[in-house]
Amino acid sequence: MTTAMLSRREAWERATNVPMLLLAVLFLGTYAWYVLDTGASPHLDTWLARVDLVIWAAFAADFVIRVVLSRNRWQFVRTHPLELLIVLVPPFRPLRLVRAALLMLGTLNRARLTRFRLSIYVGTSSVLVILLCSLAFFDAEYGGPDAKVQNYGDALWWAAVTVTTVGYGDYYPVTAEGRLVALILMTFGIGLISFAIGTTTSWVFDQLKAVEASADETERQIGTLLDEVRSLRAEVAGLRREPAEANGPPGAAGKRPAGAAGDRLTDTAGDRLADAAGNGLADTAGDRPADAGPTPTS
């Protein structure tokens, strides 16, 4: 039953990843429309607020369903703080920046983070921080007394130079809300940018190590092949020496018959000499008694 409930939650998350991401993008578009359309009518503001409320309700319902389908509900709540904050932060105007960031980051964090997904997550988070802070900065500074920001391009330029610690000083916040947004951007933005740079550097080093390991393996295989070639050459040289040793040196051809034919000739000659010597001895022994016999007396 526990495994079934866990698989049901995973199936729910897999089925709702894309819809929830689309809702987060829709909320971001709604928030950007609300900020950038400075001449919007009260009717449009009401409509955008309703859309914001519907999206918040959808994410709250999704979180509750995932908690119910979890094996350990309290552990799920503790390990998913972004989704919990999305539900707890109400859809009010002063908190729209926080809710927009939580919605986008929480949606991207629904799946398990492999190294590739972590790189995408960090890069996307960095872009979102710059985009959302520029929108919040424009919303806070535009129309204020002695405001330096006259359009969204100025706010986006300010966010870019602030997050990279360049800070030309041509644009700076003059309101309390603008300074709060600047503090958030300086605190979290530089961390995300540094983490993105570190992740990219680590990936480059891993690729270089993989290339070096591949080169070492190639050299080892080449050395093994060279050893095998040397061994084969030694075996071929040995096979070539064996027939020459069996035939003997070239100068011994006239002195000793070669091979089995010479051995047979030697054995035949020896047998003949032995037979002739034996026959001669036998003839001599047989003649001697006849010649040495006693002379008869008269």
Image (tube, rainbow, N blue to C red):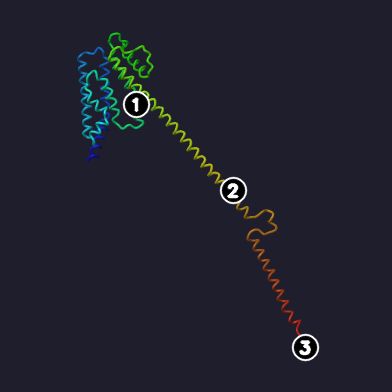
Which is more toward the observer, 143 or 181? 181
Residue 229, how many percent across, how many down? 54, 44
Classify the position of the N terminus by image quarter.
top left
Discs 1/3, front: 1
Q: Amino acid at mark 1?
A: Val
Q: Amino acid at mark 3?
A: Pro
Element marked by disc 2: helix
Is the C-beta separation of discs 1 and 3 under 8 Å? Answer: no
Residue 266, how many percent across, how many down? 67, 64
Element marked by disc 3: loop
Residue 262, how many percent across, how many down? 66, 61
Q: CA distance from mark 1 to mark 2?
A: 64 Å
Element marked by disc 1: helix
Residue found at x 53% / y 43%: 227
The mark found on residue 296 in the picture is: 3
The numbered mark, 1 or 3, whose residue comes first in the sequence reads 1
Badge 2 crowding class, 10 Å Cα cut-off, few under 14, some 14 to 19, many 20 or more, is few
The numbered mark, 1 or 2, whose residue comes first in the sequence reads 1
Q: Is residue 249 above or below residue 292?
A: above
Residue found at x 28% / y 8%: 145
Residue 207, how many percent across, how many down? 43, 31
**Which residue is the site of mark 2?**
237
